[in-house]
């Protein structure tokens, strides 16, 4: 009996240890990035363009704006498609078709981002013979569509049936009921899902390597190559220049902060409602 | 309503940021990246409406993207062969820009002296037959240097690289074993070693990995305060890469420069010549449709051959021989 | 609620047509059609993906056929492409990553679902799920500057000293390599295993635990012998999901794996993965055959992750209360 009790205590101590290790990894990553990146975050970093190779100084203003533009395209292109598709799955769809779409969306979610990059290259870059912000945004949109689709559906389904029935009983047509009653009711969750999805694709590097390419200057408009934070982190990290390493840490910190802010914001948006899905 | 308006305005501002600028895109060799980035920066200061965006993705990438039409010009340290030229949509001209040297850079803790490498030693290291730093092949030309008995970590390029071409071209010329086993190209089957992306990646990896050796363009070793060795040339002298030795390597070729500027100057004759030197070329299409881009590229080429050549020495590249410069000036008119 | 305008004539006589017009007028059909199109876009994207991968790899498939999967030569100059080193590299780093992270993740999941009070469990899970939000390139950044030196100075020499007689730990110590890459992958897939296994464990009905406790089992025995087996499908599903993730990781892997297309018995040696070689060589594949071979590699990766993901989703569907977890 004592042996069994010992095993009991030991095993649970072990599992607690596993949890501790897992949690501390995150804190370590965060801490290390803050430590190395914080000192490098200066005004220059946010406002200047990169300096010539080997010279110190300069910044990543163009990469920050570039990532911003890529996310704009993602939100304009990918989010509506996923959102409206999610509405179909939750409100209009038949069971068989819906489960096929749902399953495919989950599978598409799991496709490595580099393969999505190949698709975007074939569809956009090769046809236009141009690397562009649009091609990069297109790749990111492809990745955000399944995420938005599933989360929209999830939160629409969570709206109580009574709301739907009430709206219909008052004489609203189905689409009006959905648009004016159901969607607003689920808006919080949908917003959360969208924020999380966009945050996730914001950090993707691989698909941008041969769609948005990179740029040492500002990228005019939407159809020229552009610098982006993740690609610059990669380029600078594998280089030998200390100054570039410093900037890589700073860029990494900026990226990670974006992720964390998005995740925490999403959590906060959801929690007052007390929704059970998060 | 107001928030939508502000968002729309912001988007518009984002979209038009940078308009009024001519953006010329180029990609290719990492070998001349430091001087190219300096040049494009200086040129932009003189012509505020022109931005030349150059991405160092390796010579192979430069040729490929030029072929795909996604860039306006390319850059390579290996001149395109006839097969590659045929695949291009319009005829492409090679414009030599600078002379540089590829050096064996190493990171051996405890060794601060400048090592001298024979051709056989270099071939052996990269073939994997010379495995340790204290191997006689390395030790013999370096008497008095205490070399550790550690395994050599070889670092080479993982991407299609003109620098690789220069290096393997040299090794093929001096080592029959290398010639038959590996050969020379932008991308070879390396017998040993780790792969890194670009000259930047190789120097980064060598800098961080003890007991490693890699091959990089001279400026990368100099800029990052890395040790690099002397190499024995065809006359038997151990030569260190610098402006003088690289220029000496080009002396013979300058006299007999072909019209299309495609030459190799590795293992050049001459006592002072650095054996692993090379020209590097800008690949410019003969037909450029966009008039503004064409005008600006042509202007850049003129500038590059004039004031640009004066900036090369600060970055450890040798300027082009005068005869080559004048020949190139004439060739620029072929860009239409 | 038929519209009062249509009460006579041929339309009035046909109830189905009347209903159709009513719905059309009410806008439902339009809404249905629009939303249907967008939902179907998912299928369109997937079909396009398969098509583009298939078509653009045609050259390579025609030239090499099945020998593509058995050849170990990757020689762009000679035009010889064999995928074996990349498949090997991808599989071994992913499996090793699983080997490291599954015990760790399962342990943490058990603690979080069985031991920790709900509030703490929720907040700790939130923190762990944040790990999944860290971009791959940042893992690469930390890999290059933090993990590689540690592996090179401490871990790998230690392994050589203690287990050096095994062929797994022979050869020069680079710092970068298969082992380092596996460790990075292990950290990256940890949150998936923790999160989904915890869901699966929490979905186990209380009766299971209580029944075991009622016959005198300790908490641990109840957990290990009654709860975990009940949740095993979900746990296995989480492992497969994590595997699929690991197989496709690009940036972190290419920064620490050494980029050497060779198969080595030693885990200390450098390797190469499918995603890494595509990332490195895609922009410079001059020969059409080279590009085609890279796309074929992409196709292989795609099929591999699809199959494993599909399997994982089925497993998870059958156990967790939420159906498919949001990942």
Image: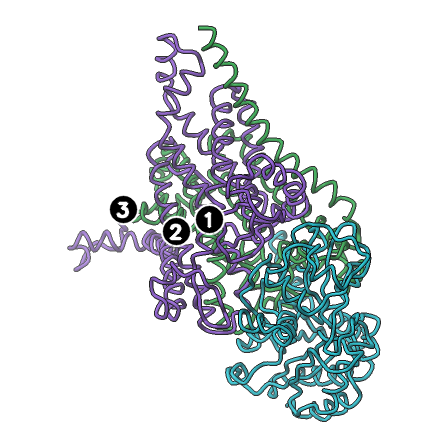
How packed is label 3: few (under 14 Cα within 10 Å), some, or many (20 or more)?
few
- In the rendered image of the structure, the colour used to display chain A is green
C116 or A167, which is in the foreground?
A: C116
Q: Quadrant of the C terminus of chain B?
A: bottom right
Q: Position of residue C28 (x, y in %)?
A: 33, 51
Circle 3 residue: A96
Q: Position of residue B318 (x, y in %)?
A: 79, 77
Q: CA distance from mark 1 to mark 3?
A: 30 Å
- In the rendered image of the structure, the colour used to display chain B is cyan
Badge nearest the viewer, 2 or 3: 2
Circle 1 residue: C247
Circle 2 residue: C304
A265 or C114, which is in the foreground?
A: C114
Q: CA distance from mark 2 to mark 3?
A: 25 Å
Q: Is residue C4 visible?
A: yes
Indicate whether C224 appears above or below B26.
Answer: above
Q: CA distance from mark 1 to mark 2?
A: 8 Å
Q: Position of residue C17 (x, y in %)?
A: 21, 55
């Amino acid at each position: 009996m004592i042996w069994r009790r010992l095993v009991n205590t030991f095993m649970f101590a072990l599992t607690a240890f596993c949890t501790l290790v897992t949690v501390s990894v995150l804190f370590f990553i965060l801490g290390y990035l803050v430590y190395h990146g914080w000192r490098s975050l200066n005004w220059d970093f946010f406002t200047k363009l990169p300096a010539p190779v080997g010279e110190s100084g300069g910044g990543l203003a163009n990469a920050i704006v570039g990532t911003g533009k890529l996310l704009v395209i993602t939100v304009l292109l990918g989010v509506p498609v996923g959102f409206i598709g999610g509405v179909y799955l939750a409100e209009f769809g038949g069971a068989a078709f819906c489960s096929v779409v749902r399953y495919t969306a989950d599978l598409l979610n799991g496709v490595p981002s580099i393969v999505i990059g190949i698709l975007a290259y074939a569809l956009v870059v090769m046809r236009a013979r141009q690397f562009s912000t649009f091609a990069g945004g297109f790749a990111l949109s492809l990745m955000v569509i399944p995420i938005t689709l599933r989360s929209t559906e999830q939160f629409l389904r969570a709206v109580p049936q009574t709301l739907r029935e009430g709206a219909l009983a008052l004489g609203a047509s189905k689409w009006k009921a959905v648009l004016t009653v159901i969607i607003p009711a689920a808006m919080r969750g949908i917003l959360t899902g969208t924020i999380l999805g966009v945050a996730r694709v914001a950090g993707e590097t691989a698909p941008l390597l041969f769609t948005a390419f990179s740029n040492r200057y500002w990228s005019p408009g939407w159809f020229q190559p552009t610098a982006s934070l993740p690609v610059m982190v990669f380029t600078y990290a594998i280089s030998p220049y200390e100054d570039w390493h410093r900037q890589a840490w700073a860029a990494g910190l900026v990226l990670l902060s974006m992720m964390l802010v998005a995740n925490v914001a999403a959590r906060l948006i959801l929690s007052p409602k007390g929704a059970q899905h998060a | 309503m107001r928030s939508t308006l502000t968002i729309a305005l912001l988007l518009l501002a984002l979209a038009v940021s940078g308009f009024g600028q001519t953006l010329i895109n180029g990609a290719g060799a990492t070998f001349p990246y430091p001087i190219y980035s300096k040049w494009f920066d200086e040129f932009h200061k003189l012509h505020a409406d022109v931005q030349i965006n150059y991405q160092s993705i390796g010579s192979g990438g430069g040729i490929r993207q030029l072929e795909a039409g996604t860039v306006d010009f390319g850059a390579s340290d290996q001149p395109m062969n006839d097969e590659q030229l045929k695949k291009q949509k319009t005829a492409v001209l090679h414009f030599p820009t600078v002379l540089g040297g590829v050096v064996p850079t190493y990171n051996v803790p405890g060794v601060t002296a400048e090592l001298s490498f024979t051709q056989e030693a270099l071939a052996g290291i990269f073939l994997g037959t010379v495995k340790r730093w204290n191997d006689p092949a390395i030790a013999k030309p370096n008497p008095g240097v205490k070399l550790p008995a550690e395994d050599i970590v070889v670092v080479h390029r993982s991407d299609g690289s003109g620098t690789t071409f220069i290096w393997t071209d040299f090794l093929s010329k001096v080592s029959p074993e290398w010639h038959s086993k590996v050969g020379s190209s932008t991308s070879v089957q390396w017998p040993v070693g780790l792969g890194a992306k670009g000259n930047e990646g190789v120097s980064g990896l060598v800098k961080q990995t003890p007991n490693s050796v890699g091959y990089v363009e001279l400026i990368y070793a100099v800029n990052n305060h890395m040790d690099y060795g002397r190499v024995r040339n065809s006359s038997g002298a151990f030569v260190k890469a610098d402006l003088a030795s690289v220029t000496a390597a080009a002396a013979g070729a300058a006299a007999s420069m072909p019209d299309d500027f495609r030459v190799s100057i590795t293992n050049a004759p001459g006592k002072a010549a650095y054996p692993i030197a090379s020209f590097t070329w800008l690949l410019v299409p003969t037909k450029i449709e966009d008039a503004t881009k064409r005008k600006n590229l042509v202007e850049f080429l003129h500038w590059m051959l004039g004031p640009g050549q004066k900036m090369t020495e600060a970055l450890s590249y040798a300027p082009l021989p005068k005869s080559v410069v004048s020949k190139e000036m004439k060739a620029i008119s072929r860009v239409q | 609620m038929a519209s009062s305008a249509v009460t006579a004539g041929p339309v009035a006589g046909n109830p189905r047509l009347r209903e159709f017009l009513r719905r059309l007028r009410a806008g439902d059909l339009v809404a249905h059609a629009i939303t249907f199109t967008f939902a179907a876009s998912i299928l369109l994207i997937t079909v396009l993906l398969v098509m583009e991968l298939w078509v653009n790899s045609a050259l390579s498939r025609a030239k090499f056929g099945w020998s593509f999967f058995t050849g170990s030569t990757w020689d762009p100059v000679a035009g010889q492409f064999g995928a074996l080193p990349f498949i090997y590299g991808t599989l071994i780093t992913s499996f090793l990553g699983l080997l490291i992270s599954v015990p760790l993740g399962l342990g943490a999941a058990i603690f979080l679902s069985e031991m920790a009070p709900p509030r703490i469990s929720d907040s700790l899970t939130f923190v762990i799920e944040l790990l999944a939000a860290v971009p791959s390139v940042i893992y690469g950044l930390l890999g290059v500057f933090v993990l590689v030196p540690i592996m090179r100075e401490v871990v790998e020499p230690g392994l050589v000293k203690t287990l050096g007689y095994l062929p797994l730990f022979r050869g020069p110590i680079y710092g970068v390599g298969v082992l380092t890459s596996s460790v990075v992958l292990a950290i990256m897939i940890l949150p998936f295993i923790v999160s989904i296994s915890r869901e699966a464990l929490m979905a186990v009905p209380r009766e299971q635990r209580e029944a075991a406790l009622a016959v005198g089992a300790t908490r641990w025995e109840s957990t290990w012998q009654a709860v975990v087996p009940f949740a095993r499908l979900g746990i296995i599903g989480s492992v497969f999901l994590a595997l699929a993730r690991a197989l496709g990781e690009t940036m972190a892997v290419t920064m620490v794996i050494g980029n050497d297309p060779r198969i080595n018995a030693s885990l200390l040696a450098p390797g190469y993965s499918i995603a890494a070689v595509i990332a490195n060589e895609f922009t410079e594949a001059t020969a059409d055959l080279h590009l085609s071979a890279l796309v074929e590699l992409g196709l292989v990766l795609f099929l591999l992750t699809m199959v494993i993901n599909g399997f994982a989703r089925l497993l998870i569907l059958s156990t967790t209360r939420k159906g498919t977890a949001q990942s």
